[in-house]
Amino acid sequence: MEVIGKQLEEFEEIRIDEILEKKEIFSSLRLFKCILGLNQTESKVFGYIMKNNDVSTTELTEKLQMDRSSIQRAVQNLSDLKIIHRKSKSMKNYVEEKQLENVNKKGYVYVYNAANMESIKKEFRMLLDKWYESMINYIKNLDTLCECCDIKFEQC
């Protein structure tokens, strides 16, 4: 308990704006991994899509310098989590919007956009609350859980 108390005291002394500025504790990658269970590739893809509109898998492979199959798995997982949305767009509109040159303007391309930031924040909060509640229940039942490991505690 001393360790937790000391950490809380240290945390109270730190200004949150300094933490965010330095990103020492809460980086986006850590947040996405902790709350959503995203791996590094999914976190990078999600971060890029959050900052850019109508992103194709080709754009992601070029900007993030990753292979196409990894990008496709990442966008599928993010789409399954409902934090990004896929839509079809004509190549002509896509090429004009992205100001691309020497690209075939026929056909369609799938593009991805992040969900509304407020809905993402709401989902983060819901998942964090759920995790918090599960940890409270774990602590309440700690004596029972330890007994299964042949560790007996005396009642205080």
Image (spheres, helix red, strand yellow):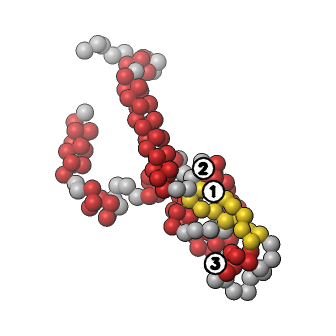
The quadrant in which residue 125 appears is: top left
Whether pointer 1 and pointer 2 mark residues with C-beta atoms closer than 8 Å, the reply is: yes
Vertical arrangement, residue 45 with respect to residue 82, above or below: below
Disc 3 target residue: 97
| Circle 3: residue type | Glu
Is disc 1 surrounded by few (<14), some (14 to 19) or many (20+) residues within 10 Å? some
Look at the numbered disc 2 and give the secondary structure of its residue. Answer: loop
Q: Amino acid at mark 1?
A: His
Image coords of residue 42 (percent x, y) = 57, 57
Depth order, front residue of 83/31: 83
Q: Is residue 70 visible?
A: no
Tell me which numbered mark, 1 or 3, is placed earlier along the sequence.
Answer: 1
Say whether residue 147 is visible: yes
Query: Mark 1: which secondary structure?
Result: strand
Question: Compared to 95, does 130 lie above or below?
Answer: above
Say which residue appears at 19% left-offset and 45% top-offset: 9
Query: What residue is disc 1 on?
Result: 85
Q: Residues within 10 Å of mark 3 (few under 14, many from 20)?
A: few
Q: Quadrant of the N terminus?
A: top left
Marker disc for residue 82:
2
* Image side of residue 57 versus residue 18, left or right: right
Report the mark closest to the observer, 3 or 2.
Answer: 3
Q: Is residue 45 left or right of residue 69?
A: left
Taking the spot 42% from the left edge, 17% from the top edge, the residue there is 144
Mark 2: amino acid = Lys
